[in-house]
Amino acid sequence: MTTALDAIDVRTPNPARVYDYMLGGKDNFAADREAAEQVARLFPESSDGVRYNRLFLGNAVRHLAGECGIRQFVDIGAGLPTQDNVHQVAHAVARDARVVYVDNDPVVCVHGRALLANTDTVAMIDGDVRRPGDIRDKVAGTGLIDWNRPVGLLMVAVLHFVEDPGEHVAMLRDLLAPGSHLVITHLSTTPERAADMARLRELYARSGITLVPRGVAEIERLFGDFEPLDQRRFIFPDLAERIARLGWGGVARKH
């Protein structure tokens, strides 16, 4: 019998599996590990970057569930299950929180569904940020998320793998009810780091992966007219400068 795992190309690196390896996970293949090591040689700070990204995500979810009363979360580009998953962080604050994970990698979906088999407030679906309508319908089909009520929409370390995400993100913002929050983290760049980022893009391109670092102003535009929350709520002050060199993250509220 053919399964989703039969379609996996283990010889080509996958962003979710590379990220998993950099977080110390075990759901990756030799090609993913080699790609991660190449990134680490070019950017020694990259291992810190993925950990800080995870820290930001956890703090954002904790804040949304605790301070903002959000009880619905949709995590697009969720990646492989690891420590402090969104549903674990949210449930530590509010046991009635519901979470739908979305990813376009079959390994992620298989592992996610296995992990969540006995959890009735969490689901895993296959979906791609470039197909917002498909995500809308599949998320609604889980019966866990009501798009007419506030949602915490998470797009963490995923949009820099999309060539032109603006229209897709705008469509997803339009789905959200007032009181919803949008969380984005993104690989950032500055003129001073243009040459380094060009080498990083070339490295990913050799593995068939599109990588598009963006300036902070361009990333901020992905939030549209949502009201930004103070970023300092989600990171430790002594890490702020180091995080800013590696990427940029924000949280914003829809009125």
Image: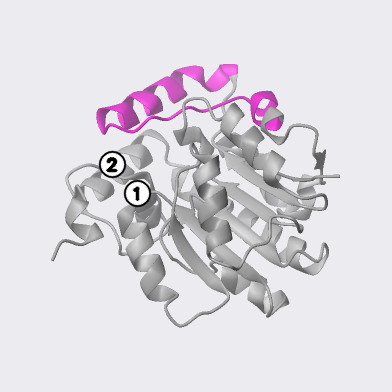
Identify the residue at horizontal 36%, vertical 74% (top origin). Answer: 114
Residue closest to the far bottom: 118
- Of the residues under marks 2 and 1, which one precedes in the sequence? 1
Note whether 173 is above or below 109 in the view shown: above
Note whether 136 is above or below 199 in the view shown: below
- Whether residue 195 appears in magenta in the rendering, the answer is yes
Q: Are marks 2 and 1 in contact (CB under 8 Å)?
A: yes
Question: Disc 1 designates what residue?
Answer: 18
Give amino acid for label 1.
Answer: Val
Q: Secondary structure at mark 1?
A: helix
Residue 197 at x, y = what percent?
45, 24
Q: Is residue 249 visible?
A: no
Res 169 label: none
| Position of the N terminus by quadrant | bottom left
In the image, 214 versus 43, the foreground residue is 214
Identify the residue at horizontal 30%, vertical 62% (top origin). Answer: 27
Note whether 218 is above or below 137 in the view shown: above
Question: Disc 2 designates what residue?
Answer: 35
- Whether residue 226 appears in magenta in the rendering, the answer is no
Residue range in magenta is: 191-220
Note whether 21 is above or below 128 in the view shown: below
